[in-house]
């Protein structure tokens, strides 16, 4: 229970890695605010998973691309709990295609959600953390933002941007007792990878030195560590959870 008494906000926590992070933080003792935009039923499943292990949490609907909605949501959380100790900027989307076929709307959606959403959530929450002189901000990037991938130029740009943003904000907030780090997952067992043709899925696995896809829970374990007291002297770093795919 290393996070007992702390309040954590996880964006995009209705499924996949976000749900696993929310459950992991809850298991470590945090009260978890489960953010979602559209799929309330899936978000309720995340909350159910939290409560099934004796954890505490609540739902909070807002669009991470809309600063006004974020400000309203954070105010509500602080009014109820007096603080936000941990923020995990996890929400993200993809619009995979070759660059020459990508549309301007795809760029707006991917950058607007993945990068702008991370920036806006951090900006709003940082005000409270600065007042408290404590905070843990953990941004979810991707191995694709480190090494690139065919057909994912927009996604790679957004995730690489998160890494640069993480390092800059870590410098800005360090004197206030706030650490900022990034986690870069590799290919993870998910709804998306489950839909891949078996041949393509095996090609991905063959490229991974550990010879398998990762799990959402393995990513969550890294996030929980970075949120905890053992990571107090770590900031501005990128932690790869990719089975050796990128070294």
Image (tube, rainbow, N blue to C red):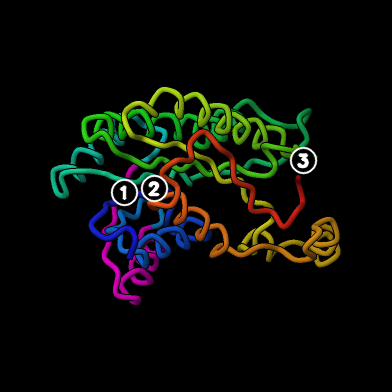
Q: Which residues are magenta?
A: 40-62
The quadrant where residue 205 appears:
bottom right
Cα–Cα gap, marks 3 and 2: 27 Å
Q: In the picture provided, is 216 more to the left or to the right than 62?
A: right
What percent of the width, then of the height, locates residue 77?
21, 46
- Asked whether the residues under the numbered discs 1 and 2 touch, taking CB atoms below 8 Å apart as contact, a structural biologist would say yes
What percent of the width, then of the height, locates residue 116?
47, 29
Cα–Cα gap, marks 1 and 2: 5 Å
Q: Nearer the viewer, residue 162 or 135?
A: 135
Q: Nearer the viewer, residue 26 or 117?
A: 26
Above or below residue 146? Residue 242 is below
Looking at marks 3 and 2 on the same chain, the residue that comes earlier in the sequence is marked by: 2
Looking at marks 3 and 1 on the same chain, the residue that comes earlier in the sequence is marked by: 1
Q: Which residue is mark 3?
A: 149
What percent of the width, then of the height, locates residue 103?
66, 29
Looking at marks 1 and 2 on the same chain, the residue that comes earlier in the sequence is marked by: 2
Q: Residues within 10 Å of mark 1 (few under 14, many from 20)?
A: some
Q: Which residue is mark 2?
A: 37
Cα–Cα gap, marks 3 and 1: 32 Å
Q: Nearer the viewer, residue 4 or 186?
A: 4
Which label number is shown at residue 61?
A: 1
């Amino acid at each position: 229970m290393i996070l007992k008494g702390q309040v954590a906000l996880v964006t995009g926590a209705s499924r996949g890695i976000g749900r696993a992070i929310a459950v992991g933080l809850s298991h470590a003792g945090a009260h978890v605010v489960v953010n979602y935009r559209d799929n309330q039923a899936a978000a309720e499943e995340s909350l159910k998973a939290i409560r099934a292990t004796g954890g505490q949490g609540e739902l909070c609907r807002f669009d991470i691309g809309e600063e006004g909605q974020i400000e309203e949501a954070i105010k509500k959380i602080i009014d109820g709990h007096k603080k936000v100790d941990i923020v995990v900027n996890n929400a993200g989307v993809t619009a995979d295609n070759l660059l020459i076929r990508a549309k301007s709307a795809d760029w707006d959606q991917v950058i607007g959600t993945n990068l702008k959403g991370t920036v806006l959530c951090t900006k709003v929450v940082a005000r409270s953390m600065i007042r408290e002189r404590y905070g843990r901000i953990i941004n979810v990037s991707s191995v694709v933002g480190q090494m690139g991938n065919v057909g994912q130029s927009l996604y790679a740009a957004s995730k690489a941007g998160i890494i640069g943003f993480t390092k800059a904000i870590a410098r800005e907030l360090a004197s206030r007792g706030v650490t900022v780090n990034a986690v870069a997952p590799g290919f993870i067992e998910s709804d998306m990878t489950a839909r891949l043709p078996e041949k393509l899925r095996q090609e991905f696995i063959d490229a991974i030195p550990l010879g398998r896809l990762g799990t959402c829970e393995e990513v969550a374990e890294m996030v929980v560590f970075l949120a905890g007291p053992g990571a107090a002297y770590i900031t501005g770093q990128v932690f790869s959870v990719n089975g050796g795919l990128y070294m």
